[in-house]
Amino acid sequence: MRKRAGIVSLVMFGLLAVSVPVFAHHGNASFESKLSTVTGTVTEYFWANPHVLVRLDVKDDSGKTLHWTVEAQNTVSMRDIGWRPDTFKPGDVVSIDVNQAKNGRPVGSTGGSSPTSAKRRIIINGKQFQ
């Protein structure tokens, strides 16, 4: 009986150890809590799992071009809120509300994508998307 309890404990510990990195991956600790608006020209749009990505060329205050990456959720979640494989096209001028990376790099997250999540403002070629 003690041997069985030991095996069960070992298996439970192993499962717990494996699951912790999964939760850490989906955290938002690396992003600021306040929203920033990023405006630029789409260079690439990746409709793929595990995360949909929009890459933008954005001019900073000094006129220098920054290459931004905006990370959204998975394709199923993004489809649920209206995104499609053709939502963005290279050359589109967009403004997207994001949470910027805390380290200051040109990376942002659109946050949650469930129907109950706060909606982020997205403007594509002058038209409000959501």
Image (tube, grey):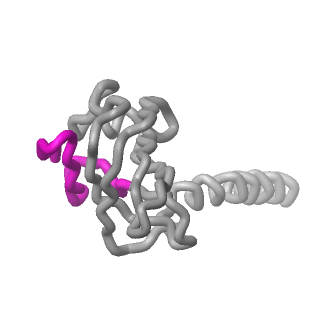
Residue 38: x %, y % from top left: 33, 58
Residue at x 82%, y 52% (from the top left corner): 7
**Residue 39 found in image quarter:** bottom left
Residue 82 sits above or below residue 126 on the image: above
Residue 17: x %, y % from top left: 72, 58
Specify whether 45 is left or right of 95.
right
Specify whether 107 is left or right of 83.
right
**Residue 43 found in image quarter:** top left
Specify whether 59 is left or right of 6.
left
- Where is the N terminus found, in terms of image quarters? bottom right
Check residue 37 for magenta coloring: no
Residue 109 sits above or below residue 29 on the image: above
Residue at x 19%, y 47% (from the top left corner): 123
Farthest residue toward the right? 3
Q: How many marks?
A: 0
Farthest residue toward the left? 127
What is the magenta range? 110-130
Which is more toward the observer, 52 or 114?
52
Which SS does the magenta portion mostly show?
Answer: loop
Which is more toward the observer, 42 or 11?
42
Check residue 117 for magenta coloring: yes
Which is more toward the observer, 90 or 70?
90
Residue at x 45%, y 43% (from the top left corner): 55
Residue 78: x %, y % from top left: 32, 38
Residue at x 12%, y 46% (from the top left corner): 128
**Residue 91 found in image quarter:** top left
Residue 29: x %, y % from top left: 51, 70
Farthest residue toward the front? 63
